[in-house]
Amino acid sequence: MHRVKVRVVEDALDANATLAKANRADFDRHGVTVVNLMGAPGAGKTALLEQVIAEGIDGVRIGILEGDVEGSLDADRLARLHVPVTQINTAAGFGGECHLDANMVRSALAAVPLDELDLLVIENVGNLVCPAEFRVGEDARVMVTAITEGEDKPLKYPLMFRACDLVVVNKVDLAPHLDVDLDLLLDRIDKVHPDVETVVVSGRTGQGVDAVRHWLRELHAAKAVVEA
C-alpha cells in the first residue's frame, strides 16, 4: 500500500513536470520571462507587486496571473494599475487547492496576452508548503516573507526558502514595533539556502523595491540575451 501511494505521487509530479515544460515552451516562444511569486498569506506579495508596477520597469511590459482559492480581491487591486491581470481560482474546478500547478496555469494561458508582455508574474496561492513542490513553467521563483512572521520560518519551512532564487523580506517598516531580530532572520535564511540573494523591503513605503525592480529587469535581460 505504501508503495502504491508513492507511485501515485511520482506519477502526479511527472505529469506536472510535463505540463510545466509545455508552459515554458509557450512562454519562451513569446519571449516572456516568468516569475513564480510565492509566500504565506499576508506576507505582502500583492503590496510588493503594486509598488513594482506603480513605478514600472523601464522597457518591460508586465502582466499578472493571480492565483487564489476564491475571489478576486488581489487581482482587482492590481488591475487598477492598468496592467493585464488574469485570475485563477483553484476552487473553480481544481478542488480548492492551496497552490497553483502547471495544469492550472495552462488552463488560464488562453486568457493571458503573452504577445503583449515581457514579464509575467504568477502570484501563487498564499502557502508556505505546497507551492514550492510544483513547477509551473517559470524562469525563476521569488519568495516574499514578512518580518511579522518571525525568525523561525526558514527553519520550519525550509523547502520554500530553498526553492527560491530571490527572497524578499517584507514589512521592514514595522521592525521598530516588533520583537523580531532581522539579522537572525537573514542568518537563518542563509543557513537553509546559502548565498541566496535577499532583499529587504517595505511594500507599504516602497523602501528597497528598486532592488526588486533591478533584479527583475536583469532576469528578463539575461533571458533575452540567451534567446537572441
Image: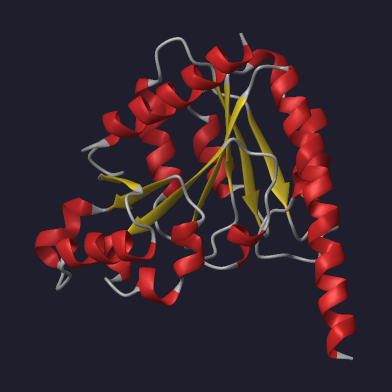
- The residue drawn where x is 28% and y is 29% is 210
Q: Nearer the viewer, residue 112 or 153?
A: 153
From the image, which quarter does the N terminus lie in? Answer: bottom right
Please name whichever residue, 121 or 206, is drawn nearer the observer in this view of the structure.
121
Residue 158 x, y percent position in the rendering? 45, 68
Task: Give the colour scheme of this rendering.
Answer: secondary structure
Along the viewing direction, whichever of 138 and 126 lies nearer the viewer:
138
Residue at 34%, 34% (x, y): give it: 212
Residue at screen point 37% across, 30% down: 215
The vertical placement of 191 against 204, above or below, is below
Q: Nearer the viewer, residue 178 or 36?
A: 36
Residue at 51% x, 29% y is: 80
Residue 118 point in image, percent of width and height: 58, 18
Quarter holding residue 22: top right
Residue projecting furthest to the bottom: 1
Query: Residue 59 appears at what percent x and percent y?
Result: 46, 9
Q: Is residue 92 visible?
A: no
From what the image shows, is residue 81 above or below residue 224?
below
In the picture, the quarter occupied by the C terminus is top right
Residue 133 in sight from this viewpoint: yes
Tally of numbered discs: 0
Q: Is residue 115 above or below residue 81?
A: above
Q: In the image, is residue 178 above or below residue 114?
A: below
